[in-house]
Amino acid sequence: MDAAREAEPQEFDRVLSSMCTEPHPVARDAAERFLATNPGDPGTYPQVARLERRAISLLGDVAGLEAPAGYVASGGTEANIQAVRIARDRADSRRPNVVMPDSGHFSLRKAADVLGVDLRVVPLDDERRADLEAVRRAVDADTALVVGVAGSTEYGRVDPIPELAAIARESGALCHVDAAWGGFVLPFTDYDWSFADAPVDTMAIDPHKMGQAAVPAGGLLVREAALLDELAVDTPYLESTSQATLTGTRSGAGVASAVAAMEELWPDGYAAQYERSMANATWLAGELASRGFAVVEPTLPLVAAAVPAPLFDALREEGWRISRTAAGELRIVCMPHVTRASLESFVVDLDRLRGREHVPLVGGE
């Protein structure tokens, strides 16, 4: 492959495991116009600062928050770290702890390590959601934060957020919801996951995933603007006097693309995309099950199935960008760029490759 070819981004037609996607055309155009702007310096770049306020307002609409505050982050990892930081700094404890389900994103492990808090990981129930009794047993007087996941990265499961928020409130802790991936599909389901459904304090919700904005465009939402005060530091050489974000220089392109995508697609465009993605996930799950593979029933547009390791590896060698869950299942995320045609092509390759003598037809390892 020549250097010019290597300098081009790969095509998305065989990318089946990523939780990022091709930006919507209006998001791409907006990103290009704001490439050189920095919302981390709002005094110098007032136009992108106004766009960021618009982005937070739109994210509030998506997440059911009437008077939203927050900022456009680099992604769910930064938002999760900041949520832990807020909780730690508000805690009345020398050694605060964070309680999260085993489905919690690995960024929360980073947060605990960086911020010096104890992380208590509790098991899941039979539906792969947070086990409420285990959460209650883990919470104590030093608990600063209870975490719920609204669209887990391995199985697309949604924790019982109202119950987790109630446990947090009873113990004097904050409640954080990681809806980085699920936030742009959950408004079109019957799940209770949002600020409107429960006394949630902070949320990660990423426009650059199902929101179809350009990377990087994550989101940190807080129920009350005062929560951001825990993050603020003085910025003496900038035109603004303080900064509550984790990074200083940030992507104006991400902010502008997030606004463009949400103004273009919320709510009808996102609703239609959810229907397409969910239909694709349901179709793929049925195709895999009909071939004898053990499939985890999709509840959001994410499919997990027990595919033998030799077959998985053979599919990777064919150029399919697929990944595994921690338990070893094939994991496919039906993002906006994943079409029925690409899934049909995947199934054709799967059928061809599993016919090879060295690849088992069904089963696990």
Image (cartoon, rainbow, N blue to C red):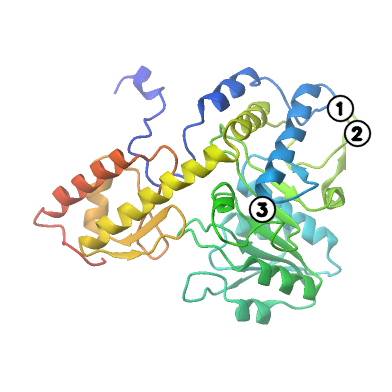
Q: Going by the image, does 78 lie left or right of 213?
A: right
Other residues around mark 1 within 10 Å, as few (<14) / some (14–19) / many (≥20)? some
At x 66%, y 31%, the residue is 259
- Disc 3 or 2, which lies upstream in sequence? 3
Image marks 3 and 1: residues in contact by CB distance under 8 Å = no
- Earlier sequence position, callout 3 versus callout 1: 3
Query: Quadrant of residue 325 in the image?
Result: bottom left
Q: Position of residue 47 (x, y in %)?
A: 77, 22
In this figure, which residue is indicated by the disc labeled 2?
241
> CB of mark 3 within 8 Å of CB of mark 2?
no
Residue 216: percent from left, percent from top:
60, 35
Contact between labelled residues 1 and 2, with CB atoms less than 8 Å apart = yes
Q: Residue at x 61, y 77 (%)?
A: 132
Name the amino acid, label 2. Answer: Thr
User: How far across and how far down the image is residue 125, in percent?
Assistant: 51, 76
Of the residues tagged 3 and 1, which is closer to the observer? 3
From the viewer's perspective, is residue 349 above or below residue 197?
above
227 to 29, vertically: above or below: below
Secondary structure beneath dot 3 equals: helix
**Residue at the spot of label 1:** 238
State the residue position of label 3: 80
Q: Secondary structure at mark 1?
A: loop
